[in-house]
Amino acid sequence: MAAEITTNAVPLDLDLSTADGTTVALGNLLTERLTLVHLVRYFGCLPCQEWLIDLDRIAGELAKESVGAIAIGGSADYQAVWLHEARGVRIPLLLDPAQTFRDYVGASKPLGWRMADPRGAAAYTRSLAKGFRPQSITKDTVRSPGVVVLDQTGSVRWRHIGTRIGHYPPLDEVLAKVAGLT
């Protein structure tokens, strides 16, 4: 595992890839005043899917406020394709197999024993009750969930790094934080 870099900025030339394998530099995705980055554990994770679909649902409203939205996972391009095709997700779903983005924003530490937190099981159960279904578990299952807000220079303006499975802040709380950023 790479050492945790944790800086206040992510390089604009950081390469990510789309589900079809196209390489895209982070800077090309930061077209709005701010960009909300959803860090999924893996695209098949139930609480990650639920939060992502909720984010996608309000992406148009965010755009009216000059706020973009993207999601970054480590692997499982086929799950990103499934989210686009079967679940109708429209925001960019990007892959970062080396987890370099996570290193820069301080989200590279694995969950470890915190994966056994019963609140994580409860988050999965809630998502199941809402009709979400698990996809294949990947090697990225040990990753922390997170939300990061970047400006157009790649500077980290706000971050939340989860401490257990499904530990995402309520979306309205994130929106309030974003609204307070100038």
Image (spheres, rainbow, N blue to C red):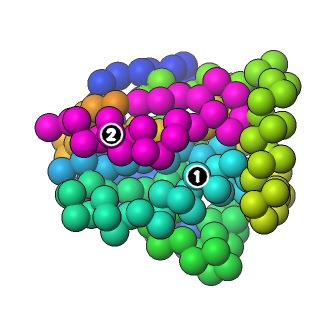
Q: Amino acid at mark 2?
A: Ala
- Count the numbered circles shown: 2
The quarter holding residue 129 reads: bottom right
- x, y percentage for residue 94? 50, 58
Against 88, is 2 above or below? above
Q: Residue at x 25, y 42 (%)?
A: 179
Disc 1: CA contacts within 10 A as few (<14), some (14-19) or many (>=20): some
Q: Is residue 109 above or below residue 76?
A: above
Q: Is residue 11 on the magenta stretch?
A: no
Amino acid bearing label 1? Trp
Task: Indicate whether 62 appears above or below 19.
Answer: above
Is 74 on the left or on the right of 29, as rendered?
A: right
Q: Which of the two labelled residues, at mark 1 and mark 2, occupies the earlier sequence position?
A: 1
The residue that mark 1 highlights is: 51
Q: Spot the residue most to the bottom.
A: 85
The residue where tag 2 is placed is 176
* Residue 106 % position (x, y): 48, 24
Tell me the residue at 52%/36% (across/down): 169
Mark 1 and mark 2: span between their CA atoms? 16 Å
| Residue 172 left/right relative to 76 | left
Secondary structure found at label 2: helix
Q: Position of residue 93 (x, y in %)?
A: 51, 62
Within 10 Å of disc 2 (Cα), the crowding (few <14, some 14-19, many 20+) is few
x then y, percent, for residue 67: 27, 54
Quadrant that contains the N terminus: top right
The circle on residue 131 is none
Disc 1 vs disc 2: Cβ atoms closer than 8 Å? no
Q: Is residue 160 among the parts visible in the rendering?
A: yes
Q: Residue at x 31, y 59 (%)?
A: 62
Front: mark 1 or 2: 2
The residue segment tinted magenta is 159-182
